[in-house]
Image (spheres, rainbow, N blue to C red):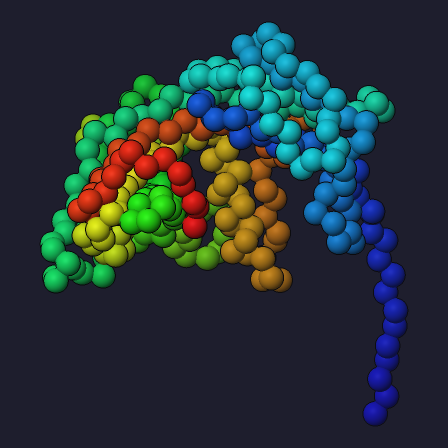
């Protein structure tokens, strides 16, 4: 039985070399920016460094900072840059060859959490998950994009003060808000989009209760000398940042499935790749304080 074989030659462009610019701008946080060059498909590196680069930052059309790119660093931090809600931020990254990458964002307004409710009992009758409700009113006259984040912080000063931080993975009971089916460019059903959702999925604009389930261990009575703070963060995202996060999730879900067209991760950079986005945070919390906890101890050892 004869077998016929032939070689197929495919010409593939090297790709890479375009400027990549990233910044996620938030009030009350240190301003940071990343500048690099994109790599080709055969590279084993994450990015190519820019040795002749610079960055210029504008706020509300006025230049507020410019500096030579510190090529030895992955991110540059600029503590002198202060931003607030509704500020318009433009970031330009360039090199000596005349290449320019530009990104724009407007910092969204935070939306207040009105209340948090949690149905939990004492430690002897604690369920595996606790039903929680986060209530907020979505402004009807503004298009908003949200992410709900839950974190736990624990301090213990039995001997020296220690600190532990955890971002909590919670069950998203409100499926109408958190899970989008047959959308966002994926054939997979019920994708978890990292707690993000658009405001058009909020059924009522006033006093909407988002339903989630948080692991019961975070509601147990604190040990002596311990303080635990359970924080609920309602993050308002710029539209581009929202699209960037969701496209990354879909790309990761579709990765390795050859029958699906690769998903392009959202970018808002003209003249290059990347994302300049922004966010604002509103929060509320539940605090548990154990016996003999001393607020005056200041030395912290992080776990």
Please give the name of the residue rendered at 18% of the width and 60% of the height, measured from the top-left corner: 127
Residue extending furthest bottom?
1
Q: Nearer the viewer, residue 160 or 195?
A: 160
Residue extending furthest front?
159
Please give the name of the residue rendered at 33% of the width and 49% of the height, measured from the top-left corner: 159
Q: Can residue 20 be seen?
A: no
Residue 97, image x, y percentages: 85, 24
Against 24, is 189 above or below?
below
Residue 173, image x, y percentages: 26, 51
Specify the quadrant that holds the N terminus.
Answer: bottom right
Please give the name of the residue rendered at 32% of the width and 37% of the height, measured from the top-left corner: 297
Against 11, is 234 above or below?
above
Q: Nearer the viewer, residue 49 or 141?
A: 49
Q: Nearer the viewer, residue 254 or 187?
A: 254
Residue 114's image quarter?
Answer: top left
Side of 256 where 44 appears, left or right:
right
Residue 124's image quarter?
Answer: bottom left
Please give the name of the residue rendered at 50% of the width and 33% of the height, measured from the top-left corner: 241
What is the tally of numbered marks visible in this picture?
Answer: 0
Side of 199 where 279 appears, left or right:
right
Q: Nearer the viewer, residue 85 or 263?
A: 85
Against 66, is 103 above or below?
below
Against 6, is 255 above or below?
above
């Amino acid at each position: 039985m004869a077998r016929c074989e032939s070689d197929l030659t495919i010409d593939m462009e090297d790709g890479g070399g375009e400027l990549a610019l990233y910044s996620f701008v938030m009030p009350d946080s240190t301003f940071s920016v990343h500048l690099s060059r994109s790599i080709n498909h055969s590279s084993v590196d994450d990015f190519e460094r820019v040795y002749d680069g610079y960055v210029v930052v504008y706020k509300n059309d006025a230049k507020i900072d410019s500096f030579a790119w510190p090529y030895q660093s992955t991110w540059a931090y600029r503590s002198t840059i202060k931003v607030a809600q509704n500020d318009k931020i433009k970031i330009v990254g360039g090199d000596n060859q005349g290449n320019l990458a530009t990104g724009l964002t407007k910092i969204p307004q935070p939306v207040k959490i009105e209340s948090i409710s949690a149905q939990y009992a004492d430690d002897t009758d604690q369920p595996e998950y606790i039903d929680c409700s986060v209530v907020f009113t979505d402004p009807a006259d503004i298009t908003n994009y949200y992410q709900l984040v839950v974190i736990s912080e624990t301090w213990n000063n039995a001997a020296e003060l220690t600190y532990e931080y955890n971002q909590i993975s919670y069950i998203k009971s409100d499926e109408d808000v958190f899970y989008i089916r047959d959308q966002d460019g994926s054939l997979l059903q019920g994708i978890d989009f990292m707690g993000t959702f658009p405001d058009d999925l909020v059924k009522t604009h006033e006093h909407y209760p988002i339903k989630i389930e948080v692991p019961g261990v975070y509601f147990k009575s604190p040990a002596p000398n311990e303080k635990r703070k359970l924080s609920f963060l309602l993050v308002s995202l710029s539209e581009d940042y929202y699209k960037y996060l969701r496209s990354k999730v879909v790309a990761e879900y579709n990765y390795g499935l050859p029958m699906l067209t690769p998903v392009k991760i959202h970018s808002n950079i003209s003249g290059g790749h990347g994302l300049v986005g922004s966010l604002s945070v509103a929060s509320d919390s539940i605090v548990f304080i154990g016996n003999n906890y001393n607020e005056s101890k200041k030395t912290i050892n992080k776990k």
